[in-house]
Image (cartoon, grey):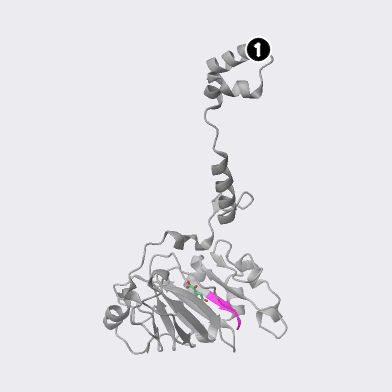
Amino acid sequence: MQKAEKRLQALTQKYSGFSKHDYSKLDVTNKIFKKPFPKTAFFLLVPLLLLTTQINFFDSSSCLIDMPSDSSKWFREPESCDICEGVTEVPKIKNISPSEFYSNFVTSAKPVVVTDGATTWPASQKFSFDFFKNLYANSDSNFCQFFPYKTEFTSLEEVLEMDPKRANLEPGQKPWYIGWSNCNDNAGKILREYYNTPYFLPNTSENIALNWIFMGGPGQGAHMHVDNVQYPSWQAQIKGRKLWRLAPPPECLYKCQEIQVIVESGEIIIVDTNRWYHQTFILPGEISITIGAEFD
Ligand SMILES: O=C(O)CCC(=O)C(=O)O
């Protein structure tokens, strides 16, 4: 490379009348500049990158580029339609043994609601906006994964500092609905005093310790999406009522249909959110609070 640069310098001194075109024809120029990056590729790649990513220079997170949250589904393996073929509703069942539950619903990935799943949990008396505000008052909630949905909040801490009138869903206040995964060991221990591992999960099943909590008011909910977590999930409706829309994977659209179910307080929905697309709506009434986790 250095040799080539020297040769070019010598030539430019000797032939000061060279045009740009002349230079481009010299073998030595090509040695220095090699093949230029094709312009067409540049014009195709840059807008694509800008459209699909947000460059995150100023963020303290460890990733330079955040892929859109839905990008995981672009690379998803095609799903077997056995999970949804012939499924026309989400059954509501109760008093089910772990073995029956496992063979009828877990292996087949058929969504189900267990109506007596959380009816006796103290959480129904205890969980409220203020309970979570106190829970995290002395502990760090900064690193909890947080879903703002349609709100302006950027962290759970901001949510817990909102005006009490808005927190209590008073008329005329801006609606809100958010979700987070508890990432704090102390908070996790306290939470576990108010709920149990669902009685219908087999003893052998590992109940993943990470809890997901979703909280907010009527008219709000999560947009239609599919998850990219490891296992199916259970979600207990502690307060309020929530409508779930479950849609089959796109490759099964001609074989399967969308199904809906309303989950009432005290009930637990079990759904493989990695395979079923799902959307939620909080129904009119009190604040909706749920707690859930993955299980295998
Ligand atoms: O409960 C909700 O509103 C959303 C739950 C959800 O999207 C999930 O568990 O993946």
Q: Is residue 129 left or right of residue 174?
A: left
Is residue 110 visible to the viewer in this orientation of the structure?
A: yes
* Residue drawn where x is 66% and y is 21% of the image: 19
Q: Nearer the viewer, residue 90 or 258?
A: 258
Q: Nearer the viewer, residue 210 or 50?
A: 50
Q: Position of residue 89 (x, y in %)?
A: 39, 86
Q: Position of residue 165 (x, y in %)?
A: 71, 81
Reply above or below: 79 against 242: above
Q: Position of residue 136 (x, y in %)?
A: 58, 70
Report which residue position mark 1 lands on.
Answer: 15
Which residues are the magenta region?
214-221
Q: Looking at mark 1, is its residue's CB closer than 8 Å to ligand 1?
A: no
Q: Residue furthest right?
A: 172
User: Residue 178, located in which quarter of the rendered image?
Assistant: bottom right
Is residue 194 visible to the viewer in this orientation of the structure?
A: no
Q: Position of residue 125 (x, y in %)?
A: 53, 87
Helix or strand or loop: what does disc 1 sit on? loop
